[in-house]
Amino acid sequence: MRISLEGKSGGIRVRMRFEQNRGRWLAVRIILGVLAFQGIVIGLWAVLAPHSWYSSFPGFGMHWVAVDGPYNHHLAADVGAFFLALGAVSLYALIRTGVESARAAGIGWTVMALPHLIYHAFHKPAEMGAVSFTLSVIAAAALLALGVALLVVVPRGPRVADPDPIDLRFPRRGE
């Protein structure tokens, strides 16, 4: 618990903050921020420019999707929509900062990332270099790790609200 005092005219305001699971909530917010950002960025890229996403993802001179089969506009746009949806759920959970919304985001990312990691780990396109392959597996594993981390790190039970502040008034001299 953290107690703060604030001077007011004629008295002080005492505020108590429970700060339950402060470190856990900070970790949850960071994870949700990372997942929301990458889900929205990748999702918008694939939805708005599916051919660019297909031929250039993840960028930085690497091409993880194009080396794995012919371009399919419908599939590329759908993948973007899935990432965009997960990013939106993560953003909602980040804004709401609730146990259930954070868990829902964690479940969504975990369910998506597990088969995604399995695919990447056991399927190396012939045209993909060793560095790109290794990085693609690490990236897929990171998504799974972040999804599972949300399920593990989110505190159990609801947050208890901080009590209302207490205003203490000092008697004035001569009263």
Image (tube, grey):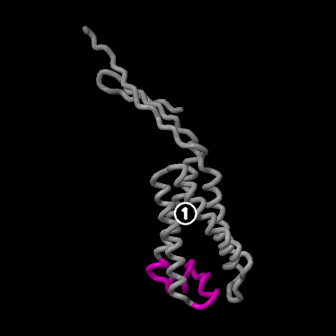
Residue 29 visible in the displayed image: no
On screen, 98 above or below 144? above
Is 50 magenta? The answer is: yes
Q: Position of residue 53 (x, y in %)?
A: 52, 82
Q: Secondary structure at mark 1?
A: helix
* Residue 4 relative to residue 7: left or right: right
The residue positioned 38% from the left and 29% from the top of the image is: 6
Q: Position of residue 60 (x, y in %)?
A: 56, 78
* Of residues 7 and 54, the one drawn nearer to the viewer in this rendering: 54
Residue located farthest toward the top when viewing the structure as drawn? 174
Residue located farthest toward the left when viewing the structure as drawn? 174
Is 32 magenta? The answer is: no
On screen, 114 above or below 91? below
Location of the N terminus by quadrant is: top right
* Stretch of the chain drawn in magenta: 45-70
On screen, 13 above or below 109? above
* Residue 29 relative to residue 122: left or right: left
Q: Position of residue 20 (x, y in %)?
A: 56, 39
Mark 1 surroundings: few (<14), some (14-19) or many (≥20) residues within 10 A:
many
On screen, 37 above or below 163? below
The residue positioned 33% from the left and 19% from the top of the image is: 169
Find residue 102 and report its image quarter. bottom right
* Of residues 10 and 142, the one drawn nearer to the viewer in this rendering: 142
Count numbered badges in the picture. 1
* Of residues 171 and 158, the one drawn nearer to the viewer in this rendering: 158
Three-letter amino acid code of the residue under disc 1: Leu
The residue identified by callout 1 is 35
Find residue 79 and report its image quarter. bottom right
Find residue 172 and report its image quarter. top left
